[in-house]
Image (cartoon, rainbow, N blue to C red):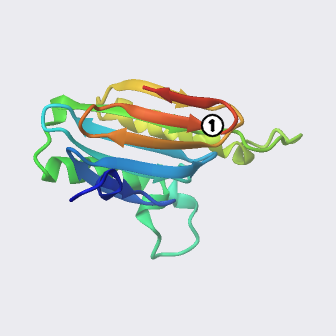
Amino acid sequence: MKTLIDHIVKVGIADLKFAEAPMHLRTSGLGSCVGVVIYDNRLKIAGMAHVMLPDSTSAKKDNINIYKYADTSLPALLQTLLDKGARRHQLKAKIAGGAQMFSFSSTNDMLRVGERNVIAVKEFLENERIPIVAEDLRGKSGRTIEFSTETLMLNVRTVNQGTQDL
C-alpha cells in the first residue's frame, strides 16, 4: 500500500525533477534561491527547479550543473514538460523564494542574489509567455515549498511566518 510519502518527489538544491498526478514535488532550503514550478493543468504534470544563481556565464568551469542556474535550468525544465506531452499554451508557473538572507552595507548588486534570481526567473517566464499565476517572493526568511500535481496548489512554509497555499 502506498503512503503519502511515496508520492513525494524531493528536489534538491540546484536540482530539477518531474512529476505527474498524484505526486507532489518538494524542495527546501529556499533562501536566496527560487523554486520554480511549471505545470500543465490539463495533464496534471509538473516540473520543479531549485534555482541557486541567475546566470551560468559566471561559472568558472566547463562541466557545470545546469540545474544550478536560471538561464540553463529553466529551458531544461520547459523542454522536459514539452517532451512529456505538455502543451505550451497550457503551461502556468508558480514561484517562491528569492529572499535577502543577510544584510549588507554594500550596494554591490552581486550580493543581491535573491533579487537577481527573481529577475532572471521572471524574465525567462515572460519571454516564454508562461504566466505566473502565484508567487511568494523576497523577504528575509527561508522557505520550503510543495506542489501537488493533483490539486495544483503550491504550499509555502516560511520560517517563523507559517504556511500558505497558492
- The residue at the point 63 percent across, 37 percent down is 115
Secondary element under disc 1, as helix, strand or loop, is helix
Q: Quadrant of residue 90?
A: top left
**Nearer to me, 83 or 61:** 83
Q: Quadrant of residue 127?
A: top left
The spot of residue 79 in percent (x, y) is: 23, 51
The spot of residue 53 in percent (x, y) is: 56, 52
The residue carrying pointer 1 sits among few (fewer than 14), some (14 to 19) or many (20 or more) residues within 10 Å by Cα, namely many
Which residue sits furthest right?
A: 105
Q: Quadrant of residue 122?
A: top left
- Is residue 32 among the parts visible in the rendering? yes
- The residue at the point 14 percent across, 53 percent down is 83
- Quarter of the image where the N terminus is located: bottom left
Which residue sits furthest front?
A: 1
Q: Is residue 29 left or right of residue 6?
A: right
The spot of residue 37 in percent (x, y) is: 36, 41
**Residue 70 sits above or below residue 127 on the image:** below
- The residue at the point 66 percent across, 39 percent down is 159
Q: Amino acid at mark 1?
A: Glu
The spot of residue 82 in percent (x, y) is: 16, 47
Return the residue at label 1: 115
- The residue at the point 60 percent across, 39 percent down is 98
- Quarter of the image where the C terminus is located: top left
**Nearer to me, 54 or 48:** 48
**Residue 89 sits above or below residue 69 on the image:** above
